[in-house]
Image: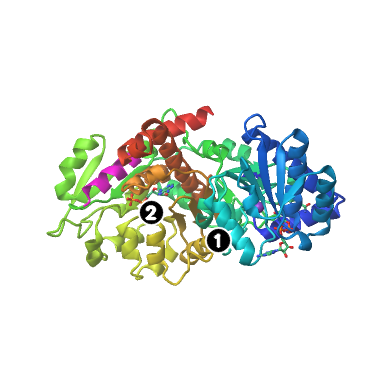
Amino acid sequence: MIKTSITVTAKQMQEIEERIFSEGMPVASLMEKAAVFASQKITQLYPLNLYQKVGFIIGCGHNGGDGLVIARELFLQGFQVSLYIPLREKSKDLTKQHLQYAEFLGIASVEFIEDLSTCDFIVDCLFGFGLTRNIEGKLREDIIWLNQQSIPVVSIDIPSGIHTDTGNVLGIAVKAVYTLCLGLWKVGLFLSSAVEYTGSLHLIEIGIPESLLMGEGIRNDDDEREEKNPPLYPPNSEERKREKNQTENVNYSFHCQYVSETNPRIITKEDVKNCLPLPRHVNTHKYKQGNLLLICGSNQYAGAALLAGYGAKCGGSGMITFAVPHGLKKTLISHFPWALVIGLPVKEEGTIISLRNLDLNKYDAIAFGMGIGREVSAYQEQTLAPILNSEVPLIIDADGLNILAEGRYWQTIKQRKSPTILTPHIGEFKRLFPQLNLSENSLEVLKMASKMTNTTILLKGAKTLVSEKGINNWIVNLGTPALARGGSGDVLSGFLGAVIAQTNFNIFPVSKVVATCGWLHQQGGILAAQNHTEMGVDGVTLSEYINKAVVKTLGD
Ligand SMILES: NC(=O)C1=CN([C@@H]2O[C@H](COP(=O)(O)OP(=O)(O)OC[C@H]3O[C@@H](n4cnc5c(N)ncnc54)[C@H](O)[C@@H]3O)[C@@H](O)[C@H]2O)[C@@H](O)CC1
Ligand SMILES: Nc1ncnc2c1ncn2[C@@H]1O[C@H](COP(=O)(O)OP(=O)(O)O)[C@@H](O)[C@H]1O
Ligand SMILES: [K+]
């Protein structure tokens, strides 16, 4: 199972391969295996009865070698194969041998990439994880030409031009319809700069022994499942709070020789199933099921409070309390008759100026910031400061993050004992951490930011990334642009709040729960888009589909 969720860097992949070779597996055999399985996948995607002409762009390294084996297999099956080999003279020995055999078989090669213009599809085997410098000159022109064609491209291992570790484009990169990643997921495939290039991602199993990937301290899912039933505690008892909220040194990653414990894992359906829904004891009651406080809304952004409420509604917490500008009380009650609504004092513009006498520590989670407006910044000592000083797991979103970005509270945040979860989109992240360059290496920067601040950060975008204190890192590898719509994030914060309010962090690390919520949020969006098209996924619709996503996931 671990092979489908682990991600590696180029160096780690090289080390794993070297170990396999040093244990006796011939290089050529591994290449043969990878390429034959890749060719099988290609023929599923492009069956011979529908697609006859296939072009290959062959590089000089082993990615090119893979390409030649795939080309040979397709040729032998009856495809019309053309090879474009721009770096022929520089070919590595194994690649040269495959080229010689391809020529012996009579597989045609072409002089110019334009000669592939009549192909039904093209297989990109120019560079894999060996690409280290920018693509320039003629190769650059070739890729520009390729990207201008409407011919579908399948990239082998990684789209040529994408940096294996950062996902950044090294000058230019191939835009693929499918990427068939060999053996283990290369981490760059999941980072935002690569999203436009990878197309649909498929992992080709090449038999890397799991023993090389497992290490001490790995928790398997069965252990978690057994522990999932939480002990019964009186509501809000000190004992329960202490146990529930302790997160220090909980590290569910692995200590493996080849793969760092901080390598992000892809959150899988199995991970999600393992986390949610949280079990309910038969004799539970509402205060044992998580008591969530949502501090949100302003006259200007009343909708954000409502959408956070709709999100929270999906999360199953026993009690939900809204603390909103008092002018919004009636609206909130009309939407959420089951919730408590507390009116807060406001300034003329309708933004909250204090939390009055709210006893924050009686809640199991607080979500703060959705639609509160920037003006709250002037009242941060009466609002954000007591929230940060509470001993409650905390989610901060939207304008809550903008107040944080002013920089006065990082020390307080660092010292918090309960989990602090920040949910910025890329713009908010840049405001929070102006000293960090997110575009250089988004994953490493995210890890650094969460480590520096002692928080869990969920970075929103086409791919959602989660980092808990730089240690436990996750990638949400699904998503829909249907969610690029005002309010989707408010739904996520509410949902997250409701789930966090019920979570025992002794059983599940914060990062895994946060990634699970991120996954279900995106999966909800995908299901909603299937039924309503991408045009129809407003926040309320999205929230309805989050529960459908839970039901579907459990049934799958
Ligand atoms: N070793 C094996 O038998 C296996 C190989 N695989 C394949 O091997 C690939 C890695 O192979 P390599 O390490 O040979 O690397 P690549 O095939 O990615 O290419 C590296 C070659 O390109 C040259 N190069 C790098 N940047 C360049 C640039 N900007 N312009 C021109 N030339 C440039 C390098 O000098 C080197 O010769 C993987 O991505 C995968 O496709 C594995 O996946 C399966 C097993
Ligand atoms: N192209 C996309 N693909 C997948 N998810 C997206 C895309 N664009 C936005 N999203 C998701 O939608 C949500 C938007 O949140 P946010 O930017 O905070 O919006 P708002 O503040 O309006 O609610 C995030 O969860 C983000 O991951
Ligand atoms: K490639």
- Mark positioned earlier in the residue sequence (2 or 1): 1
Tell me the amino acid under the disc marked 2. Leu
Determine the main secondary structure of the stretch shown in magenta. Answer: helix
- The percent position of residue 68, horizontal first and vertical second, equals 76, 48
Q: Residue at x 48, y 50 (%)?
A: 463
Q: Which mark is residue 168?
A: 1
- Front residue of this view, candidates 502 and 221: 221
Residue 59 falls left or right of residue 490: right
Residue for badge 2: 394
Foreground residue, 104 or 21? 104
Colour scheme: rainbow
Residue 410 visible to an observer of this rendering: yes
Neighbor class of circle 2 (other Cα within 10 Å; few <14, some 14-19, many 20+) is many
Label 1, residues with CA under 10 Å away: few <14, some 14-19, many ≥20? many
What amino acid is labelled 1 in the image?
Asn
Q: Which residues are magenta?
A: 301-311
> Residue 185: percent from the left, percent from the top?
64, 49
Q: Residue at x 58, y 52 (%)?
A: 146
Image quadrant, ligand 1: bottom right
Side of 42 relative to 242 (left or right): right
User: Can the viewer see residue 136?
Assistant: no
Magenta-span inclusion, residue 307 = yes
Q: Quadrant of the N terminus?
A: top right
Q: Is residue 229 magenta?
A: no
Looking at the rendered structure, the secondary structure element under dot 2 is strand
